């Protein structure tokens, strides 16, 4: 490690500890109210015998904007997964002192996520899944829910794309985040929920909360209502998401016009995503044979 790298490394450690101190003082590690929302759903919906294990995929440094760190502090077992080596080094440091916390440096995809969770002896019905990898989220969540049954899921969506538009980035093992091009829309998430018998509890800006149908009865929101209440009609939305203003027009377009808008907006990524205005058309497009981006295998 040269002098510059050493300075960056120790500067990051200082920043991590400052974040931990600052967020501890304010009583919240999550970006918005996700931490409290999750705690409320755990109390209301999670059975007492459900394993208190949280899996955080895309855990970052483990502290900043974390939806899982408060659970570690409350005594939960945890697996934090991060693909960036620098963030992972900080994640390991953040997990020190928590005997039930483990971490993994891994780039997660649908082909390896089941084996990864099994290697760490994650229970089939573990308590909470946090998923935020800014790219292949649709495919990773589909793979997890095909083999596991987490009691609650917090997953980041592409909040720009309103229902009924279905959008999902095609699977690319080397995906790199681009401007407004990532993840999946809330309507595509609803389709995954339908496939795996889950439901949407609510949306908190760009984080959707899910639960199995059997656990969340009486708590689920209709797709349009969840999007409207959780993002579109929030009074501070345009300030909090100022970078989204160039996609604001989408909210005043018909589904057909919205499809054309997105095709034009994502012109440079033609062939790298699925897009449809209804569930049937979307699911007709999505298949194992067609799921790869043109830059992928």
Image (spheres, rainbow, N blue to C red):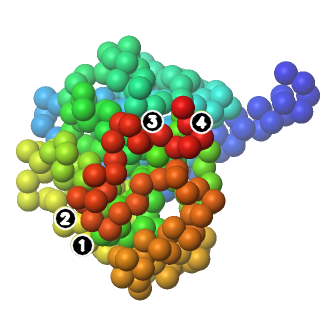
Q: Which residue is mark 3?
A: 57
Does 201 sit above or below residue 24? below
The x and y percentages for residue 78 are: 39, 28
Q: Of the numbered discs in the image, which one, if any, rests on residue 221?
A: 2
**Residue at the location (69% across, 43% down)?**
15
Which residue is painted at 60% across and 41% down in the image?
295
Q: Secondary structure at mark 3?
A: strand
State the residue position of label 4: 174
**Residue in the image at 8% along x and 59% along y:** 218
Residue 225 - label:
1
- Between the residue at mark 4 and the residue at mark 3, the CA separation in whole angstroms equals 16 Å
Q: CA distance from mark 3 to mark 2?
A: 25 Å
Against 83, residue 218 (above or below) is below
Give left or right: position of 252 versus 6: left
Is disc 1 placed on a helix, strand or loop?
helix
Give the quarter of the figure containing the N terminus.
top right
Can you tell which of label 1 and label 4 is closer to the viewer? 4
Residue 51 horizontal/vertical position (percent): 22, 27
Closer mark to the observer between disc 4 and disc 3: 4
Q: Tell me if mark 3 has few (under 14), some (14-19) or many (20+) residues whose alpha carbon lies within 10 angstroms of its own.
A: many
Q: Residues within 10 Å of mark 1 (few under 14, many from 20)?
A: some
Identify the image quadrant of residue 146.
Answer: top left
The answer to whether marks 2 and 1 mark residues whose Cβ atoms lie closer than 8 Å is yes
Residue 80 visible at all: yes
User: Which circle's residue, 3 or 1, is located before the other in the chain?
Assistant: 3
């Amino acid at each position: 490690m040269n002098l510059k790298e050493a300075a960056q490394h120790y500067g990051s450690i200082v920043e991590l500890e400052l974040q931990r101190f600052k967020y501890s003082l304010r009583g919240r590690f999550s970006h918005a109210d996700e931490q409290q929302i999750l705690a409320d759903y755990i109390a209301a919906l999670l059975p007492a015998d459900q394993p208190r294990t949280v899996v955080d995929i895309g855990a970052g440094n483990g502290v900043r904007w974390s939806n899982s760190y408060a659970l570690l502090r409350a005594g939960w077992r945890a697996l934090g997964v991060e693909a960036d080596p620098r963030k992972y080094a900080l994640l390991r440091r953040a997990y020190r002192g928590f005997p039930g916390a483990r971490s993994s440096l891994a780039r997660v995809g649908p082909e390896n996520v089941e084996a990864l969770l099994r290697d760490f002896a994650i229970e089939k019905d573990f308590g909470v899944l946090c998923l935020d990898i800014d790219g292949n989220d649709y495919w990773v969540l589909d793979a997890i829910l095909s083999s596991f049954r987490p009691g609650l899921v917090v997953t980041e969506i592409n909040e720009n794309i309103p229902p009924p538009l279905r959008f999902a980035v095609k699977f690319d093992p080397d995906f790199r985040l681009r401007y407004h091009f990532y993840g999946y829309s809330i309507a595509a998430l609803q389709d995954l929920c339908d496939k795996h018998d889950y439901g949407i509890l609510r949306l908190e800006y760009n984080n959707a909360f899910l639960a199995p149908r059997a656990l969340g009865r009486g708590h689920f929101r209709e797709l349009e209502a969840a999007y409207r209440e959780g993002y579109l009609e929030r009074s501070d939305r345009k300030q909090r998401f100022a970078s989204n203003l160039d996609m604001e027009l989408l909210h005043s377009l018909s589904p057909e016009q919205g499809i054309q808008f997105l095709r034009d907006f994502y012109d440079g990524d033609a062939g790298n995503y699925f897009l449809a205005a209804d569930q049937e058309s979307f699911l007709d497009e999505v298949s194992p044979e067609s799921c790869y981006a043109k830059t992928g295998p």
